[in-house]
Image (cartoon, rainbow, N blue to C red):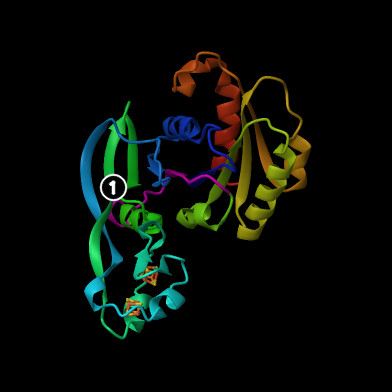
Amino acid sequence: MIIGLLSLRGGVGRSVLSRALAQKFSAPVYELEVGLPKLWPAEEKEKEVVWGRLSRFKREKCDLCGDCVKQCQFGALSLEGETIKHRGPFCHGCGLCKEICPKKAIELKEYQVGEIVYGTTDGIELFAGRLLRRTPLEGTVIKKLKERFPLPSRAILKAPCGLHGEALSGLKEAEALILVTQPWDRLTEEIKLFGELTQGLGLGGMVIVNQVREEVSVASWCTAYGLFYAGEIPYLPGFQGDLLKAWPEGEAFWDRVRQHLEGGK
Ligand code: SF4
Ligand code: SF4
């Protein structure tokens, strides 16, 4: 089964849960948070550069007509005084500016925009990608990662932070989604949002609440939104990253997660 791991907020334990699920399911992890990957193999076995197209200006040919600025739907261009300002972090390399430029002052050039890697950390197989330039080409890196290292029948996909289109775009192959969260004042809202999301996608959804100091009562909320509540992982003082070792009492929790996912509910 391909499992997608999501969270609305950062720092709630997606990386830790990804590793633990990988160990429990004997599955590799795909780190799709390529803007800022937390999971990267300690032992790299294969690595490749990812190329992507970005626009480049030949300023000497430009007559400042401004057509390209109007054409760019990503806000990557602006006319500032006697020059066209190009903001690389917004450029998707779509090429529309090049097509419209009457002076042929714009070209598309291939740049090294990222890299992908396969390797292991503590025996866990990891496939990861990261951007090497400030560009919005996360999708290019993720696509290359999956092309170069096709998903096996079991895998954990660690999505970027958020419950929106960009975070979900790398999870097309997911057969079930898990929301990882922590106690906070908008937990029920978050569960509602996740429930609506999974229903809209027609996928099964599971909720795990991490770092719990006092019991949270969200099981009925999960049920109301068609979600399976796997339960709570307690706050573990001095926790060092390997959840299975740090929480040996968690066997019943992991059995519940496994039974639910393998039961295909
Ligand atoms: S390539 Fe596309 S995104 Fe980049 S500057 Fe040109 S129009 Fe804008
Ligand atoms: S469309 Fe071409 S000539 Fe006009 S401002 Fe843009 S780069 Fe310059």
What percent of the width, then of the height, locates residue 255?
57, 29
What percent of the width, then of the height, locates residue 263?
58, 42
Q: Residue at x 33, y 43 (%)?
A: 127
Q: Residue at x 21, y 43 (%)?
A: 46
Residue 58 seen in the figure: no
What percent of the width, then of the height, locates residue 142?
37, 54
Q: Is residue 223 left or right of residue 50?
A: right
Local crowd size for mark 1, using a 10 Å CA cut-off: few (<14), some (14–19), many (≥20) = many
Viewer-nearest residue: 86 or 81: 81
Residue farthest along the front direction in this orientation: 81
Q: Residue at x 47, y 71 (%)?
A: 73
Viewer-nearest residue: 226 or 171: 171
What percent of the width, then of the height, locates residue 257?
58, 34
Q: Residue at x 24, y 78 (%)?
A: 61
Viewer-nearest residue: 141 or 54: 54
SS at badge 1: strand
What's the amino acid at mark 1? Answer: Ile
Residue farthest along the bottom direction in this orientation: 102
Viewer-nearest residue: 78 or 137: 78
Specify the segment rendered in magenta.
Answer: 147-162
Residue beneath label 1, please?
116
Whether residue 154 appears in magenta in the rendering, the answer is yes
Q: Is residue 155 left or right of residue 192?
A: left
Give the quarter of the image for residue 43.
Answer: top left
Against 235, residue 38 (above or below) is: below
Ligand number 1: quarter of image: bottom left
Whether residue 219 appears in magenta in the rendering, the answer is no
Against 1, residue 182 (above or below) is: above
